[in-house]
Amino acid sequence: MRTPTLLIHHGAYQPLWQQPGLIQVGPQIANGPESLRLSDLSVTGLHNALRQRGWASKGVLIQYTDPFLLRAAPMRGIRQWPGPRLLACGDLHHGPDPVGTLQRYCAAEPHDAVMLTFNAALLQDVQQRLPTPVRCLAPSFFKYPIATPSPTPRLELLHVGSLGPHHPRRRELVKALLKRQQVPFRHTTTTNAAEAAQLYAQHALVLNVPLNQDLNHRLFEVMASGVPQVIFGDRSLLGHNSPLMNRPDLFWANSIEELEDLVQRLFADPNKLKSIPIGPPPYWDLRALLKAALAP
């Protein structure tokens, strides 16, 4: 039997994430063939939960968390786990002193390596502040709903996402695009990734407005939907030596004028836009991901 990899997270069980050998573990997850409910968020609690299922305490432990959860509900007793320990951290662009929060937690609960799920632009900063190996291997263990692009997509620039108080830059850009009316533009929100995928697939082009230094899920959701996207930001978001750097379906703009000019040029030749080759996100095989993340 393949040595298991235990992925501890705070969300519901995610069927799309499943790969051979992966067991999802967490307080919102029900017991199943590839899942384990964990009400006591500690390694002692994990040992007990595994024993109740008749499963051995072995394999790689991946803790998926973020600075907010590290403050509110940190997992304790990491040293007690007998196998490799990998901390996967997202949302390093949120809240007060997020990198400092990660640094303090890792000092108290040492892991063998740290993996940034999406903050490639912050990699060097985090590497300088942690003694363990740190890498950004987006999209890591995530996978996204697939959609079939429409043969006659709507010639509109689509933006999907929140315009709440934590997204002032995004809100200002959306309001300006609607007011200026220089390009056909639509803004909306969705309740889940599957709904968003179907919406992306109906449009010719998607606008992605990352928050601070976050690469974000939307980048990969749009790829999985088979639609090109314009990212409002700088290519440095991708970090160094990124496999995403030369993708033909990613366009970049740093100002609203640059964005409008780009969209107008792309919409001037809809057939050319529709013919852009769009590969799937650069998904990781679980074994390859662990080998890369845990390398010395």
Image (cartoon, rainbow, N blue to C red):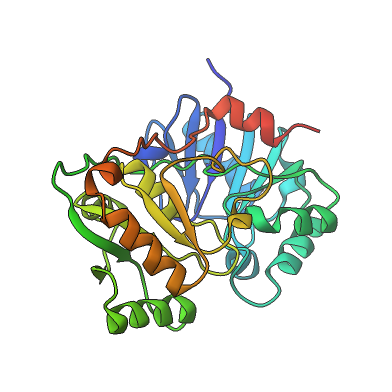
Is residue 58 among what the camera can see?
no
Query: What residue is shown at x 79% (from left), y 43% (from top)?
Result: 133
Choose top left, top right, bottom left or bottom right for residue 292.
top right
Q: Position of residue 168 (x, y in %)?
A: 47, 82
- The one nearer the camera, 5 or 19, is 19
Q: Is residue 188 left or right of residue 88?
A: left
Note whether 155 is above or below 4 in the view shown.
below
Q: Position of residue 101 (x, y in %)?
A: 72, 67
Q: Residue furthest left?
A: 152
Q: Is residue 158 left or right of residue 57?
A: left
Note whether 210 is above or below 1 in the view shown.
below
Query: What residue is shown at x 52% (from left), y 43% (from top)?
Result: 139
Quadrant including the C terminus: top right
**Exactly how many numbered labels are in the figure?**
0
Is residue 184 among what the camera can see?
yes
Choose top left, top right, bottom left or bottom right for residue 164.
bottom left
Q: Position of residue 134 (x, y in %)?
A: 74, 46
Q: Position of residue 76 (x, y in %)?
A: 69, 55
